[in-house]
Image (cartoon, coloured by chain):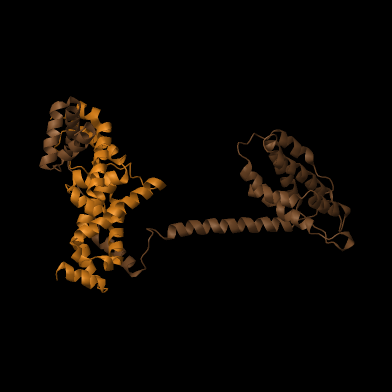
Chain colours: A orange, B brown
Amino acid sequence: MDELELIQGAREGDTEAFHALFDAHSGRVFALAHRYMRNQADAEDVMQETFVRAYHALATYDPSKSRSFATWVNRICVNCSIDLLRRARHRNTRSLEGQSMNTLAANTPEDDPERVARNREIRNRIDSAIERLSPHQRMIFILRHEMGHSIRDIAQSMGSTEGSVKKHLFRAVDSLKKRLRHFALEAGYEL
Amino acid sequence: MNCNDARHAIVLEHYGELSDDEQARLDEHLRSCQRCDADREETRRVLRLVSAQDPVRVPDFDRERSWRYISARMRGTPSRRWFPLVPGWRWGLVGAGLLLAAFLGIVIGRLGVKPSPEPDTTMTEAAATKAPNVPSVQPMLVTHLEDLRPILLDFANSASGAHGATITVDERLLRALLLQNLLLRRALEGKDPAAAELLDDLDLILKEIVNGRGPGSASQAQVRDLIRDREILFRIQILRRT
C-alpha cells in the first residue's frame, strides 16, 4: 500500500493505516522535536501531539498541492514545538533550559577527559545561546544549521515566506555571534 | 550593496543561499569594506564553533507507548488544548473558591450571636495605631465593603418599631470588621478623602450595631436611619465601582 492509499484509509477511519503512517514518519518527527525541545520528554509530547493533530486534520491535507505528507506533518510538528516551548517558557514548568544536550553527546570511554570536559563546556555555552533565541529564530536556526533544510523548505514547513525566514535566520545568527564571539576567539576556532 | 545588506548576505552566504548575482555584489562590497569583511570572518568563526561540537545523538523513544497514547486521543474529539483538563481544573477550583467565599460571607453575615453589651475597642484602637502604611489598600477596601454590604442591607431594609425583627450579627465578625475599618481608615488618611469619610461613617455605624440590643431597639432604627441619611449604600456602590 503506498502512502496516498494509507492516507485515504486513515481518513476513512482505518487506524492501522494511520499506524503505518506513524511508523513511517514518527522517527523523523521525533528527531526534529528533540533537536528543538532539547529533552526527551518534551520531544515525545510534541511528537504525540503532532500525530494527534495530523489525524484530526487529515481531511484538510491535499496531496495535489505538491506538498508531501512528510512536509505537511513537519509543519504540524514545527507548530507544536513552538507552541510547547512558548507554554513552557511562560509557565516555566518543565526545565527546558536546564537540561543540556551535552548529556547526549557521543563521548566514548577512550576520549581524553579534558577534551570531554572542554566539549561539554562549549556545548553548554552553545546550548545556552540557542535557548535564548526566540521560538521562531530557534526553529529556523535548527532547521537550517543543524538539519540542513533549505530556506525554501523551512518557509514551507513554517507556513512563512522565504524573506521572513532569512530575516529570522539573520537575527538568530546575529544573536549567537553576540553571545559566542569571545568564546569562539578563546577556543581558537580560526578559519 | 550597503553594509546592512551585506551583513544579511554574509549569513546567507555561509549557508549557500545566495544567488550568483548576490554573491558577486557581496564580494564587491567586501573588497571595499574592512568592517564587513571582519564581520564575515566572525560569522564563520562562530558558526564553525557551533558546528564543531560532537553530534547530538537522538535518543530512542517508546513507539508502542506513544502509539497507545495517540490512538486513545484519536478516538476522542479533537482538542485545541494540549492538556484540556488542566485549565478546566484550575478554573473549576477558582470558581468553587469564589462560590465558597461568597457563601461563607453570606452565612457569617446573617447567622450571628447576640452582641456583648460593651465592645472592647481599646484593643482595636491600639492595633490600629500600629497599622503599617499599606502601599495599595484599594483591593482590601473593596473586600471590606463587600463584607459589610449584606449587614448594612439588612439594617437598611429593617422595619421600625416593635414589628421589626431583630438583626443579629456575630460579635467576632463585628469586631473584625471594626478593626479592619480602623486600619483602612488610617491607611487611607490623606490619600482618599471620600473613602476616609465613608469609613468614618461606617465606624460610627458599626459601633452603633455593636452597642444595640433587643428586638426593634431604638439602636437598630438609628443604624437604619444613619445608613439611609448618609447614603452609605450608594456611596459604597460608587467606591466599589471606582
Give the side of residue B15 with respect to residue B89, left or right. Answer: left
From the viewer's side, name the closer residue of A56 and A113.
A56
| Residue A87 visible, this angle | yes
User: Based on the displayed image, in which of its 4 quarters is residue B107 positioned?
Assistant: bottom right
- At 34% from the left and 48% from the top, the residue drawn is A85
In the rendering, at what x and y percent does residue A73 appear?
Answer: 24, 59
Give the side of residue B114 with respect to residue A172, left or right. Answer: right
User: Is A144 drawn above or below residue A8 in the view shown?
Assistant: above
In the rendering, at what x and y percent does residue A179 appear?
Answer: 28, 32
In the rendering, at what x and y percent does residue A97 appear?
Answer: 33, 42
User: Is B36 drawn above or below residue A66 in the view shown?
Assistant: above
Question: Which residue, as the protein is rendered here, is positioned at the far front?
Answer: B1
From the viewer's side, name the closer residue of B129 and B118.
B129
- At 28% from the left and 59% from the top, the residue drawn is A50
| Residue A187 visible, this angle | no
In the rendering, at what x and y percent does residue B34 appear?
Answer: 17, 25
Give the side of residue B81 with respect to residue B179, left or right. Answer: left
